Amino acid sequence: MLPLIGILIVIVGFALRLNALLVVTLAGLATGLASGQSLPDVIAAFGKAFVESRYIAIVWLALPVIGLAERSGLKERSREVISHIRAATAGRVLLVYLALRQATSALGLVSLGGHAQMVRPLVAPMAEGAAENTHGAVPEHTRERIKAMAAGADNVGMFFGEDVFVAIGSILLIRGFLEQNGITVEPLQLARWAIPTAIVAFVIHGARLLLLDRRIAADVSAAADERDTGART
């Protein structure tokens, strides 16, 4: 039972909202010491795990590059580009991104997208620019709604698109779970049955994205009415 003290430390630490890295480190040290290992052995285990998993940190290298690009005007340039396309609306821009995200994920290219790499610096500003190009200035809560829908398009596209690709972790996880419960299926079968699910997800969320344009128009109209009422009073 004593090695389970690490779980208690994690629960208490998170409940007190302490630094997550500190809590997890203390939990690991306590678990190692409670299981009879010496302090040097526990630290050596930490170092070995870090070295073997250091490739996970590679993704963080892209964040400073994205930050520099944003500081150099990436968002403004994205809005400017989309303003030259008259047929572009917020809903249509996000619908195109949903289709691209789902198609590339179905081919195994799940890294071609993401909130930090694509949604925040490119997709959301382009959708906002398209909304302003169509309706003029939009209220702040509508701007936040557009950002949320952009993030949702990325989530839906990747989640339902990646299952179509055979050699993806989610397919292997499903196969392993079914196999443990006595159901043997091939990854190709799972991927094949993921296709109709992906199509339905695209149709449903695509409809929501197209309805977003109506919601933006209603919000802009309501905001204009409030301004007129305030001006008369």
Image: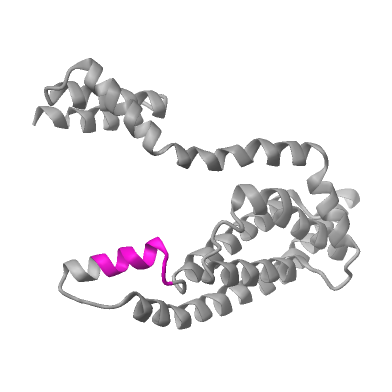
Where residue 43 sits, quadrant-wise, is: top left
Pick the residue in front: 196 or 210.
196
Q: Is residue 181 above or below residue 151?
A: below
Colour scheme of the picture = one colour
Q: In what quadrant of the picture does the N terminus appear?
A: top left
Q: Is residue 143 above or below residue 92?
A: above
Q: Is residue 22 magenta?
A: no
Is residue 221 rendered to the left or right of residue 201?
A: right
Determine if residue 183 is in view.
Answer: yes
Pick the residue in front: 66 or 5.
66
Count the marks: how many?
Answer: 0
Q: Which residues are magenta?
A: 166-176
Residue at 84%, 47% (x, y): give it.
Answer: 76
Where residue 213 sits, quadrant-wise, is: bottom right
Is residue 210 rendered to the left or right of residue 48?
A: right
Pick the residue in front: 225 or 87.
87
Determine if residue 229 is in view.
Answer: no
Q: Is residue 173 magenta?
A: yes
Where residue 226 sits, quadrant-wise, is: bottom right
Give the x, y percent position of residue 56.
46, 41
From the image, give the main secondary structure of the stretch colored magenta.
helix
Give the x, y percent position of residue 162.
48, 67
Direction left: furthest residue: 1
Residue at 44%, 36% (x, y): give it.
Answer: 54
Residue at 34%, 74% (x, y): give it.
Answer: 187
Is residue 58 rendered to the left or right of residue 27?
A: right
Give the x, y percent position of residue 2.
10, 27
